[in-house]
Image: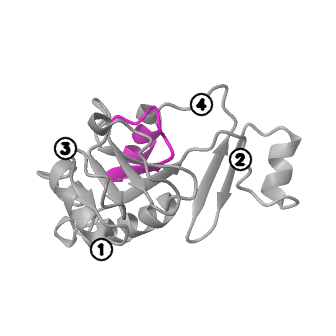
Amino acid sequence: MNEGVGIPVVSVVGKSDSGKTTLMEGLIRALTARGWRVATCKHHVHEIDIDQPGKDSWRHARAGSRVTMISSPTQFAVVRRVESERSLDEIAAEAAAGGCDILLTEGFKRSGNVRIEISRLARSDEMISEPGAIVALVTDNPELRPDGVPVFGLSDASSLAGFIEERFLSGSTPQGDARNGD
């Protein structure tokens, strides 16, 4: 967990096409089914354009708007121009301010303090992290068994979610829990 943030930050890392996004989807489903409010952040090394070219909000940003907001009855999005990349602590603070219990990130290979690596045998037979730098490994490679690191199967997001819940969310009550009136 990143100290001083208020919510745990867990990063899923691995080589390109190793299954990070599929694992993230499984974790999100499993944790939200347990009542946790999950925030996610995908790291990109290039500039991203999440708005659709030609749409009004895209045109606003291209005209020079520093903050562009899009609001509908079921969604609200804010796109901000920034001078430098946000730290994980800053991203986690945004997630916490949005009422989330945990931030799952994808692709923060170097900045995440709590990393879960996914290594798919069809993609690679080795890990990108040192064994002491990860809290869990997700793999289909029977040769990868680092000492002291729990190992989960590629399709076992539910057990991995249980591990995350026990290790990083114990002592908390899900904000989406019916006991809180949500």
Residue type, mark 2 in image: Ile
Q: Which residue is mark 1?
A: 33
Does the magenta segment cover residue 40? no
- Judging depth in this view, the residue of 144 and 182 nearest the camera is 144
Which SS class for mark 1? helix
Q: Is residue 7 visible?
A: yes
Of marks 4 and 1, which one's residue comes earlier in the chain? Answer: 1
Disc 2 crowd, CA 10 A, few/some/many (<14, 14-19, 20+): few
Q: Nearer the viewer, mark 1 or mark 3?
A: 3
Give coordinates of residue 158: x percent, y percent.
27, 70
| CA–CA distance in space, label 1 to label 3 | 31 Å
- Mark 4 or mark 3, whichever is nearer to me: 3
Q: Are marks 4 and 2 in contact (CB under 8 Å)?
A: no
Quadrant containing the N terminus in the rendered view: top left
Q: Which residue is mark 4?
A: 85
Q: In the image, what residue occupies the spot 30% across and 61% down?
A: 142
Q: Going by the image, does 17 lie left or right of 163?
A: right
Q: Mark 3 = which residue? A: 147
Residue 16 in the image, given as x and y percentages of width and height: 57, 52
